[in-house]
Amino acid sequence: QEDILVLRAINDVNLPKFTDADLPLFRGITSDLFLGLEVPTPDYSALMEAMEIACKQLIGRPPTALTVSSYKTHSMNVQPTQQLLAKCLQLYETVTVR
């Protein structure tokens, strides 16, 4: 159990920092260090649903000076893409680890 906790903490802290090209290398290194160890995937379905709803609520909403630096010329168009949702989950995991 402790080895799963350590690997999960290492992943949660480091994965958000890497580019897509670096992820296979990092995963290869951690799999060599933790042979045969599989970290169970947490269920974030409720969080993903809430993030998608929040993004949809922002579409078309006029920004304020606090949300966008050039708010007078831009409109908010936050699309719940897989990349955005993945980065939000990584940020969530990083914050919860600390």
Image (cartoon, helix red, strand yellow):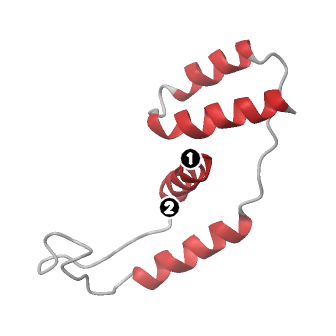
| Element on which disc 2 rests | loop
Q: State the residue in front, 13 or 45.
A: 13
* Pair 1/2: label in front: 1
Kind of residue at badge 1: Arg
Which residue shows up at 65% across the image and 68% down it? 47
**Residue 24 place in picture, x, y as percent:** 59, 24
Q: Is residue 17 above or below residue 27?
A: below
| Element on which disc 1 rests | loop
- In the image, taking residue 64 as reference, residue 90 lies left or right, namely right
Which residue shows up at 80% across the image and 32% down it? 4
The circle on residue 15 is none
Which residue shows up at 76% across the image and 52% down it? 42
Kind of residue at badge 2: Thr
Question: Are there few (<14), some (14-19), or many (20+) residues within 10 Å of tag 1?
Answer: few
The residue indicated by pointer 2 is 81
Question: Are there few (<14), some (14-19), or many (20+) residues within 10 Å of tag 2?
Answer: few
**Residue 61 place in picture, x, y as percent:** 33, 87
**Cα distance between the residues tagged 1 and 2:** 26 Å
Is residue 77 something one can see in this rendering? yes
The quadrant the N terminus occupies is top right
The circle on residue 98 is 1
Q: State the residue in front, 70 or 21.
A: 70
Q: Earlier in the sequence, mark 1 or mark 2?
A: 2
Which residue shows up at 46% across the image and 32% down it? 18
Q: Quadrant of residue 29?
A: top right
**Residue 15 place in picture, x, y as percent:** 54, 36
**Residue 64 place in picture, x, y as percent:** 22, 83
Q: Quadrant of residue 76?
A: bottom left
- In the image, taking residue 9 as reference, residue 4 lies left or right, namely right
State the residue lying farthest toward the top. 32
